[in-house]
């Protein structure tokens, strides 16, 4: 019994060293050597300031920007507290939230169909992307606020639309942060 | 539903099938200690570990010795994790200066990671230091997976051997699982995940300057409201990829971040998503081939695989079909899938995954006892939410957890041949071994433990204040939340209807008990069967032997699994998800 216990103790310590420390530290070194940008979080920098990560969504509320999806992470897109809304489909709070968002969006672009992702919160609360349909839906508002033509915005969205991986996997999508940064640089 | 969606699911299925034989063969070589191409690098490491620990790798154990070593190692490593959690503020790699964990949370988490459950009552990015994540949690992802694989191999040996007292050496099987199988795959796949954008660093959380500062309404404790301008975004970082790889490969499922595999730093692209799903199924699926190879009946291995595949496909079809329909309670929303949007029920889902990849991930992660999630299960439409519940209730045997899936399935195989034997009036046999009263008693005991754990705890929770306090979604969904919590912990899955507030003394302690019962109480009877079978004589096959190969056996096996599951759980499911589905269609919200 005592011999087995000492064995178990030694085995725990040795394997903790190998799999709990050597492995992750080597992986950290290797990743920073081979994929330094990805390993650091795919950060977007401008003039030495970090503006965010292309993988982490941000809140946009001004009329001049493309809006991200609703977020349940903290007070919205809190990248230190990722979370979905965890509202059940039959929860009145969900029904009410979507109802009020739908009413707002209908005023903004009357008559157009509202894409599902534009009024639903993502699982992470940090979804960096919206569907191409959700980007198209916002064109009239932004065109008016910025005095840009709808066609120019359409071209911009097309440039930022990422298709399925190898044409098969995932869904087409538009990165909101990158789209808005490009929008700001339009003259 | 779209043609592309079905095609993605079909391709995933083909890839799993294609991996089964080569990986299964490799596992066979590793456990039978035959030469492999990795020996030159790994043999010296293996020998060194044995020498330091004082392991005699030539000595084999009987089932009691094997089980005793397993319990001892699990106990010791559990205590070390508890210690790390309770002292993390004084340990290195804690750039966010996170405090020590409270005793009940530390205990729940230590149990959770030791039992391969990875139930998480906490928000990792604001609770766990990098050191705790690496040396505590990711480490247990390795060991709990390796222990599961070792147990499965020991049980296979029990079936395969004749008149043998021993079923292998626990320390050797565990070491070889970690060194030959988990470690090399983790290094390659971990780097592949980094290439997609999964982070891997030890730096403090990043401060980003928001492109558009936000005004946020705050409410103070005395009820007065004030406005606050937020100009920065704090982005959580960490050694994620190294943990993500073993989290999927070992069917552990404990997220580095709260949102788990929905978080863009854990699962940034459809490619990483595909890799992660394949990693969940790879080893459990391959082990069926190893079963066939070690018992000398490749056809039996494939018959078991087919039963698993049948149950998996049924689940994914139901989940994808119901989620595509969307939530009828949400008016004025376009949920029709097209080339420019995924449509369907997008609450709790990421745009990059859409409906098909979310429904597929949900099915895969709960068929296997992984429990990682790439979408919020709590927000699934009721019938789609019932798919993961049923998957776990059936005993995590649809491919299942690494190792635990296979030995769980062997219990059902024994039950199936027993029932077939009753029908034709002959002593049941399993690959030349007579199945007798002791084996059947142990099999039933193993199945009963987790069913009883789930139903009794859930029943207590719904009549006590402490239990009801956890509910975040009212109506029938509240019952589903409680049912899911105990099902997930007893099944060692670890996913959740995550709205439930489980970081309370009641849930932390009862869920920990459920996890321990679901892991250790369920496996001891299985080891006893293995020991008993190993000692038996081989009886030659006769005309009256019910074959454990072919479609007839596969159908019988599926039927036994479904009937046992349905008889046990149908009443509770009808009051939870089924009732919610009917009320949702009637337009009733809570």
Image: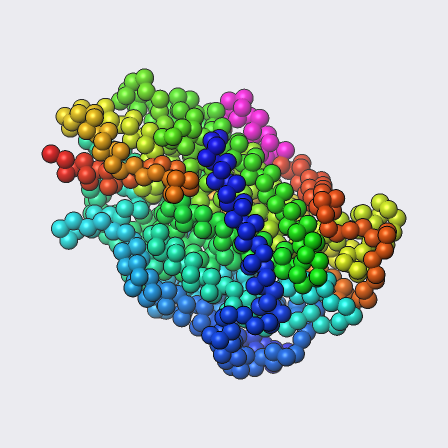
Give residue B354's position: percent from left, percent from top: 42, 37
Q: Is residue B87 magenta?
A: no
Establish if B57 lies above or below B543.
below
Establish if A125 lies above or below B476.
below
Return the residue found at the far right: B425
Give residue B53's position: percent from left, percent from top: 54, 79
Return the residue found at the far left: A187
Residue range highlighted in magenta? B574-589
Q: Is residue B580 magenta?
A: yes
For the point 54% across and 36% down, the residue is: B319
Visible residue check, residue B67: yes
For the point 59% across and 40% down, the residue is: B313
B581 vs A94, nearest the viewer: B581
Q: Quadrant of residue B50?
A: bottom right
Give residue B336's position: percent from left, percent from top: 43, 26
B432 vs B387, nearest the viewer: B432
B17 vs A87, nearest the viewer: B17
Q: Along the horizontal axis of the image, is B516 left or right of B96?
A: right
Q: Quadrant of residue B270?
A: top left
Q: Along the horizontal axis of the image, is B485 left or right of A54?
A: right
For the point 35% across and 51% down, the residue is: B196
The scheme the figure's colours follow is rainbow
Establish if A168 lies above or below A64.
below
For the point 22% across and 49% down, the residue is: A44
């Amino acid at each position: 019994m005592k011999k087995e216990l000492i064995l178990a103790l030694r085995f725990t310590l040795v394997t903790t060293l190998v799999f709990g420390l050597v492995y992750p530290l080597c992986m950290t070194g290797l990743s920073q050597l081979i994929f330094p940008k990805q390993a650091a979080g795919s950060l977007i920098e401008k003039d030495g300031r970090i503006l965010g990560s292309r993988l982490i969504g941000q809140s946009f509320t001004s009329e001049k920007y493309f809006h991200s999806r609703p977020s349940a992470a903290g007070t919205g897109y809190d990248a230190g507290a990722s979370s979905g809304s965890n509202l059940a489909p039959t929860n009145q709070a969900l029904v009410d939230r979507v109802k009020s968002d739908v009413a707002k969006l209908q005023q903004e672009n009357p008559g157009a169909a509202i894409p599902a992702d534009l009024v639903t919160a993502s699982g992470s609360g940090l979804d960096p992307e919206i569907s191409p349909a959700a980007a198209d839906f916002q064109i009239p508002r932004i065109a008016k606020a910025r005095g840009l033509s709808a066609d120019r915005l359409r071209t911009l969205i097309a440039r930022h639309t990422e298709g399925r991986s190898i044409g098969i996997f995932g869904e087409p999508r538009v990165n909101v942060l990158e789209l808005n940064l490009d929008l700001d640089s339009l003259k | 539903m779209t043609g592309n969606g079905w095609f993605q699911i079909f391709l995933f299925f083909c890839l799993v099938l294609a991996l089964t034989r080569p990986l299964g063969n490799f596992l066979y070589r590793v456990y039978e200690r035959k030469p492999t191409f990795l020996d030159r690098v790994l043999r010296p490491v293996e020998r060194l570990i044995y020498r330091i620990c004082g392991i005699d790798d030539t000595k084999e154990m009987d089932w009691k010795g094997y089980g005793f070593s397993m319990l001892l190692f699990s106990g010791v490593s559990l205590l070390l994790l508890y210690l790390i959690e309770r002292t993390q503020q004084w340990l290195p790699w804690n750039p966010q200066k996170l405090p020590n964990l409270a005793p009940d949370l530390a205990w729940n988490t230590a149990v959770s990671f030791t039992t391969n459950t990875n139930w998480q009552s906490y928000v990792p990015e604001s609770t766990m230091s990098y050191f705790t994540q690496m040396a505590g949690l990711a480490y247990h992802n390795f060991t709990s997976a390796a222990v599961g694989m070792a147990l499965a191999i020991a049980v296979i040996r029990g079936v395969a051997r004749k008149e043998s007292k021993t079923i292998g050496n626990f320390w050797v099987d565990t070491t070889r699982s970690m060194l030959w199988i988990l470690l090399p795959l983790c290094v390659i796949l971990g780097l592949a995940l980094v290439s997609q954008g999964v982070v891997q660093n030890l730096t403090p959380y990043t401060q980003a300057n928001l492109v558009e500062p936000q005004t946020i309404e705050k409410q103070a404790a005395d009820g007065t409201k004030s406005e606050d301008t937020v100009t920065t975004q704090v982005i959580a970082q960490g050694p994620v990829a190294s943990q993500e790889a073993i989290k999927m490969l070992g069917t552990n499922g404990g997220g580095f971040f709260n949102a788990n595999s929905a978080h863009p730093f854990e699962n940034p692209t459809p490619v990483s998503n595909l890799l992660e799903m394949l990693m969940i199924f790879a080893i459990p699926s391959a082990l069926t081939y190893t079963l066939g190879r070690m018992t000398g009946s490749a056809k039996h291995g494939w018959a078991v695989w087919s039963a698993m595949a049948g149950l998996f496909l049924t689940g994914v079809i139901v989940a994808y079909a119901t989620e595509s329909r969307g939530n009828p309670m949400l008016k004025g929303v376009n949920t029709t899938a097209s080339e420019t949007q995924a449509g369907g029920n997008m609450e709790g889902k990421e745009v990059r995954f859409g409906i098909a990849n979310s429904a597929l991930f949900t099915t895969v992660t709960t068929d296997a006892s992984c429990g990682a999630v790439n979408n919020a299960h709590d927000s699934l439409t009721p019938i789609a939410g019932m798919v993961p519940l049923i998957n776990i209730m059936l005993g995590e045997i649809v491919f299942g957890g690494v190792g635990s899936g296979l030995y769980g399935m062997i219990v059902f195989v024994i039950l199936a041949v027993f029932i077939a034997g009753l029908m034709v009036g002959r002593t049941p046999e399993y690959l030349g071994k007579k199945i007798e009263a002791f084996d059947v008693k142990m099999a039933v005991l193993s199945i009963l433990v987790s069913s009883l754990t789930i139903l009794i705890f859930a029943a207590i929770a719904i009549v006590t204040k402490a239990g009801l306090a956890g509910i975040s979604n009212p109506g029938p969904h509240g019952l589903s939340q409680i049912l899911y919590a105990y099902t997930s912990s007893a099944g060692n899955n670890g996913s959740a209807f995550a709205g439930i507030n489980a970081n309370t003394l009641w849930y932390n302690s009862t869920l920990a008990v459920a996890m321990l019962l679901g892991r250790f109480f369920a496996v001891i009877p299985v080891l006893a069967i293995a020991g008993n079978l190993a000692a038996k004589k081989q009886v030659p096959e006769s005309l009256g032997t019910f074959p454990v190969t072919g479609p007839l056996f596969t159908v019988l096996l599926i039927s036994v699994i479904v009937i046992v599951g349905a008889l046990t759980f149908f009443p509770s499911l009808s009051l939870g998800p089924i009732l919610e589905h009917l009320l949702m269609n009637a337009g009733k919200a809570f």
